[in-house]
Amino acid sequence: MRTIQWNTDLPAVEMIDQRRLPAAMEFISLKSHVEVAGAIRQMIVRGAPAIGAAAAFGLALAGYESDARTAPNLLADYDAAAKTLKASRPTAVNLAWAVDRVMTVIKERSPGRSIESIRGLALREAQRIADEDVEINRRMAEFGASLINDGDTVIHHCNTGALATVDWGTALGAIRMAHEQGKKIRVLVDETRPRLQGTRLTAWELEQYGVPYDIISDNMAGYFLKTGQVQAVLFGADRVAANGDVANKIGTYMLALAAQDNQVPAYAVVPTPTIDLSLAHGGLIPIEERDPSEVLGITYAGEQVAPKKASARNPAFDVTPARLVSAIVTEKGIVLPPYSPNLKEIVSRKP
Ligand code: MRU
């Protein structure tokens, strides 16, 4: 089942409301690009490839919202919508990548076309991005699964499954593939504070796939790594810089540090659209800081845990230096250090 889809009749972008899982599985229907940008900001849809596909459909929707009668006016409406969508979240490069890809097609191929035909161009490109995401993830899962052995216990951070993509997933896709290949594996699911993507979403997905798992709080990972109970660490990425530095959900850096200290490989599973060769190193990746209420809002036995007047910081991502990443798994193959030349080569390689 796809997490994001286009409804031709309305038209509208439909997506799973990830805020409701695992309590309820509900689709939400968004009828404007502003609603799509809002859904990305509020994490109704989340995960780098999923927000890329959502933004692409959001841009296509802007074409149907527009009452422009001339192509230049329609293009101006697309431009404005592209800006709104790109501003919704800063770290995952897939968002800007997908919006730019649709805009390029619109700009290059609109001359001489009718309004309706330009709308069709944008929608077809958005649909292609969504379809390609599913194919990419399946190929990447095969490569990723080859790094997981029968009998392994692996630690997984955040949610990188079907929910974080259009379907199948990145790091969780590799874990699912290893399970479907008949390997007996177990997953330690980092709960992933503060939004608990691990507890809420990854655990829910693993249940659907029948993969055995245990939820651990993020600060338990070091214990399991040090006591030899883990054979690999897997995570996704929101952006990978040209030198192999990986921006991913907050907590990934500490996890990779503990993995290296215990000689356990840490693998980033990353589709090539997430690799941003325009940034030389991870220090240049914009890191989103979200509302402190996400940290402070946690309750226990029905009461807020933090003092009423407490303040908090909430960076949503961190950057894991390339030296802590054992390999970067892409849909075109597994990339090993040195990352600077090898990432450049894999990005330009034909599928
Ligand atoms: O803030 P989120 O939930 O959108 O962050 C998602 C992650 O950090 C994922 O691990 C990431 O997008 C990589 S894999 C799809």
Image (cartoon, rainbow, N blue to C red):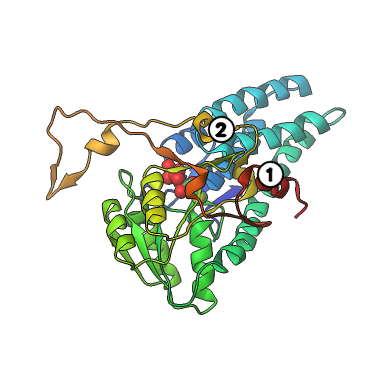
Indicate the secondary structure of the residue bearing disc 2: helix
311 horizontally vs 69: left or right:
left
Q: Amino acid at mark 1?
A: Pro
206 horizontally vs 281: left or right:
left
Above-or-below relation of 103 to 260: above
According to the picture, the residue beneath numbered tag 2 turns out to be 33
Question: In this rendering, does residue 245 appear at all?
Answer: yes
Residue at image position (61%, 48%) is: 6
Q: Amino acid at mark 2?
A: His
- Residue 7: give x, y in percent of width and height: 60, 48
Q: How many marks?
A: 2
**Figure quadrant of the N terminus:** bottom right
Disc marking residue 327: none
- Residue 89: give x, y in percent of width and height: 48, 33
Residue at image position (41%, 37%) is: 42
Mark 2 neighbour class, 10 Å CA radius: few under 14, some 14 to 19, many 20 or more: many
Question: In this rendering, does residue 47 appear at all?
Answer: no
According to the picture, the residue beneath numbered tag 1 turns out to be 341
Residue 79 or residue 113, whichever sits in front: 79
- Residue 2: give x, y in percent of width and height: 55, 57
Quadrant hosting residue 260 = bottom left
Above-or-below relation of 28 to 107: below
Residue at image position (62%, 28%) is: 82
Indicate the secondary structure of the residue bearing disc 1: helix
Residue 281 or residue 209, whichever sits in front: 281
